[in-house]
Image (cartoon, rainbow, N blue to C red):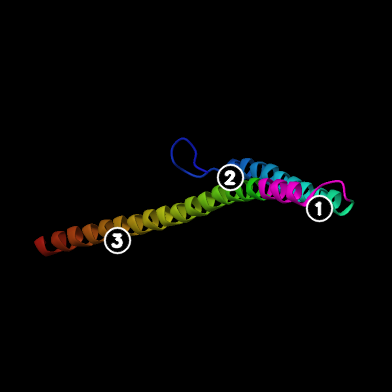
Amino acid sequence: MRGRNGTYHPANDELLRAQLSRLDRKVDGATRERQRLLDLYQRGSLELTDVQRRAQEIDGRRELLEEERRAPVEKRSLLAQQNRLRHRIASFAQGMCAGLNDLSLRAASEAGASLT
């Protein structure tokens, strides 16, 4: 996750973990709810049409939760990739600046040496 200045902050890992943990609990809850529904059907407490309707609702809710869980993980992965690229570009630029400075110093010393 990005901070205010567009950079990644490790503290956001904890926020992401908390968010994913919350979503995992909700997905697990939906899975348990579906299992309880099947148990009620097997005991004869619910009609098949009720079970099918409720199972469809639970499955839809679980799919939404799973998608909600995937989104921040993918976003974090993308941000990490962008940060690695940003660091590589910065390192390249620093290397280029150092090389140009070295080249300028050599050219200046060679020019000074040729004047003498």
- Which of pointers 3 and 2 indicates the residue nearer the eye? 2
Q: Which residue is mark 2?
A: 10
Q: Considering the numbered disc 2 on the image, is that residue within a helix, a strand or a loop? A: loop
- Which of pointers 3 and 1 indicates the residue nearer the eye? 1
> How many residues crowd mark 3 within 10 Å: few (<14), some (14–19), many (20+)?
few
**Mark 1: which amino acid?**
Leu
Q: Which residue is mark 3?
A: 99
Task: Please identify the residue farthest to the left as the structure is shown.
Answer: 115
Tell me where residue 95 appears, x and y as whole percent.
Answer: 35, 59
Tell me where residue 74 appears, x and y as whole percent.
Answer: 53, 53
Instruction: State yes or no: residue 80 in magenta.
Output: no
Give whichever of discs 3 and 1 has the lower sequence position.
Answer: 1
Give whichever of discs 3 and 2 has the lower sequence position.
Answer: 2
Judge from the rendering whether residue 89 lies leftward or rightward of residue 29; answer left or right. Answer: left
> How many residues crowd mark 2 within 10 Å: few (<14), some (14–19), many (20+)?
few
Residue 101: quarter of image: bottom left
Instruction: State yes or no: residue 49 in magenta.
Output: yes
- Which of pointers 1 and 2 indicates the residue nearer the eye? 1
The segment highlighted magenta reads 44-58
Judge from the rendering whether residue 76 lies leftward or rightward of residue 34; answer left or right. Answer: left
Give whichever of discs 1 and 2 has the lower sequence position.
Answer: 2
Q: Considering the numbered disc 3 on the image, is that residue within a helix, a strand or a loop? A: helix
| Residue visible at 80% across and 48% down in the picture | 47
**Mark 2: which amino acid?**
Pro
Q: Which residue is mark 1?
A: 38
| Residue visible at 87% across and 46% down in the picture | 45
Q: Considering the numbered disc 1 on the image, is that residue within a helix, a strand or a loop? A: helix
Task: Please identify the residue farthest to the top as the structure is shown.
Answer: 4
The foreground one among 56 and 100 is 56
